[in-house]
Image (cartoon, rainbow, N blue to C red):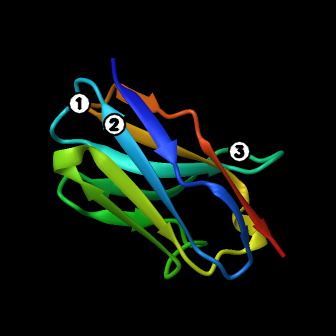
Amino acid sequence: QVQLVESGGGLVQAGGSLRLTCVASGRIGNFNIMGWYRQAPGKQREVVATITSGGITSYADSVKGRFTCSRDNAKSTVHLQMNSLKPEDTAVYYCNIKWGGSMNFWGKGTLVTVSS
């Protein structure tokens, strides 16, 4: 079974930075996509950033230029460096990994709160 464990969330003032980390364990497909999603209160879950096992990244327009997604394949780890945080970035951030078209796993989430 695959497990994803997020860390690094917390409370930060607007303009500040946080770095989220997700560690994956279990039997993981070699060619996978890891990513970060978020869900704010009363809103649907949305994609924030994804990164392929080859290092190709994709970002939501709302975070481009502020967030950076990176990964360490040897450690099955993905990071999300979040800079210039805004109150609207407040949400529970979830780590995700998927491969093979049908394998799709989620972490339990970590709360990020940005105060104004």
Q: Which mark is residue 28?
A: 1
Q: Residue at x 46, y 37 (%)?
A: 5
Q: Nearer the viewer, mark 1 or mark 2?
A: 2
Residue 55 in percent (x, y) is at: 23, 61
- Above or below, comparing residue 53 to residue 19 in the picture: above
Residue flagged by tag 2: what amino acid is it?
Answer: Ala
Is 34 rendered above or below residue 113? above
Q: Is 15 positioned to the left or the right of 23 in the image?
A: right
Instruction: Check disc 2: other Cα within 10 Å, few if <14, some if 14-19, many if 20+.
Output: many
- The CA span between labels 1 and 2 is 8 Å
Tag 1 secondary structure: loop
User: Is residue 99 toward the left or the right of residue 31 in the image?
Assistant: right
Q: Which residue is mark 2?
A: 24
Front label number (2 vs 3): 2
Number of residues whose C-alpha sits closer than 10 Å to that of mark 1, classed few (under 14), some (14–19) or many (20 or more): some
Count how many numbered circles sit on residues in the image. Answer: 3
Q: Name the residue: 32% across, 57% down.
A: 51
Question: Residue under circle 3?
Answer: 44
Kindly identify the residue that appears in the image at 50 percent across and 34 percent down.
Answer: 107
Question: Are discs 1 and 2 less than 8 Å apart at CB?
Answer: yes
Point 29% across, 57% down: residue: 71
Q: Earlier in the sequence, mark 1 or mark 3?
A: 1
Judge depth for marks 1 and 3 and give the one in front.
Answer: 1
Q: CA distance from mark 1 to mark 3?
A: 27 Å
Q: Along the horizontal axis of the image, is 106 left or right of 79?
A: right
Image coordinates of residue 99 in percent, x first then y, are 28, 35
